[in-house]
Image (cartoon, grey):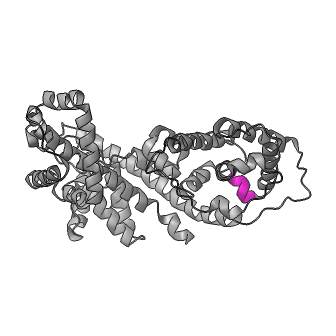
Amino acid sequence: MIQINQSLQEVKEEFFSICRENQIPTHNKAALLYELSTRLEADKKNSLFRQMILLVLADTGVLLNYFRTFQEGEEEEEFQSLKENYERLAADDRLQQAMSFKWKEVWASCMKPLKINAQYDVNETVYREKTKQAVRLYQKFMERSEKNSIELYNNLHHFICMAEQIDECHMIMPLFLFQLMTRHTGRLATKENLNVSFKSLWSYKEYQTVQDNGKNYKRYQLYAKLFVKLCKAYRGHNGVDLPLCQYGFWKTSNLAGWIMDTRPKKAMKALTPFVRDLLRADMSSIACWESEEYSSNAIFGVADREEQSYMDKFRDDYQEVGQAVREFVFDHIEYVLYWMEYLYADHGVLQGYVEEIYRECIPKLPEEKAWLENCIRAHIYEIVRDMMHQGVRAKVTAVLTQEGEEKEE
């Protein structure tokens, strides 16, 4: 393991020595994170590779210093920030891994059918108040016409009474109610004496997040708000483990990942501390103090005013280029890997790949638009680089949060 309490120079020497020994590229952050994640994915118990990923995520530009020149005293201040960031990340990572074991136990218990214990009074005041609260949240966030039915109250009351009597279910009540409301939305409000399979509550659900049909995204946003409100309603309740609820929210569907990508502010309230850390972490391959020669405009000779005109006056062309290039690169993902390999190493090679994508995606421009050609080339360069960032973030997040998945199999 790398000893963080050493000097910056010692930490850097050890870090880059390990990279050289293992043939891990360090010429840009994307390539470094991707390769470290690939190694950790292949060897899940390798604590050194895990530590190195956290160090890169904690870096403020002092470990991976590609272009910056520090003033006197600045470097030590940045190194102190790195150490503080790393300690927070490492602590949240340990908590996340501990929750994976806890979740396995709770999840197994909640998969079993629940029965009301005869010694409990189902009309107890506290249960009635919790039911009313759950009904109000259902009515606010579920798009159903039967929001005021007596069946809704009775069914929610029935399941709340059951769940409150089982420690494992009580521990994750916000998530339990969320699963119940989102997976049995209509039946909750219409079916008398509803009975549900508890396996249906906890089996993994893949929501359709790739394409918006006009309703999906709105519904998912309401679901996100519902989960956050349920967690808020149970905050401070004795025996309720909100971080575990957030962990379960991440583990039971792809909805948390969608919220992370599309509603980052909302995600901060719906995800575990460690996943929030990953959301905030700088995984961009672009160095903070990037040299001008590596900017897309410099590479393709585009003036700032030309770029602005392309974006403003030719908005339709700008959007069409973006869509066409993304669709092409999704089908030819090797271009993302080329950007990892050559970014900050040889932008001349990347210019060649831009030309290939240009020929495949861009029709011949009319004479009056010929000046846009280099603007489009610079745009292509940025699109692929952005896709590289997205891919690296997805890879790092998946690898660092897969521990629980391995334990559940």
Residue 256: give x, y in percent of width and height. Answer: 51, 50
- Viewport quadrant of the C terminus: bottom right
Which of 124/138 is in front? 138
Which residue does the image show at 21% across and 58% down from the upper left? 335
Region rendered in magenta: 167-174
Q: Is residue 341 visible?
A: yes
In the drawing, does residue 20 fall left or right of residue 138? left
In the drawing, does residue 4 fall left or right of residue 243? left
Residue 313: give x, y in percent of width and height. Answer: 21, 27
Which of 391/5 is in front? 391
Residue 35, quarter of the rendered image = bottom left
Which of 215/97 is in front? 215
Residue 162: give x, y in percent of width and height. Answer: 80, 55
Q: Is residue 295 visible?
A: no
Q: Check residue 25 for magenta coloring.
A: no
In the drawing, does residue 103 fall left or right of residue 6? right
Please say if 142 is above or below 344.
above
- Viewport quadrant of the N terminus: bottom left
Which of 404/95 is in front? 404
Which residue does the image show at 23% across and 65% down from the upper left? 24
Which residue does the image show at 87% across and 59% down from the upper left? 117
Residue 259: give x, y in percent of width and height. Answer: 49, 45
Q: Main secondary structure of the magenta part?
A: helix
Which residue does the image show at 57% across and 61% down from the upper left? 204
Task: Say how many tags the image has.
Answer: 0
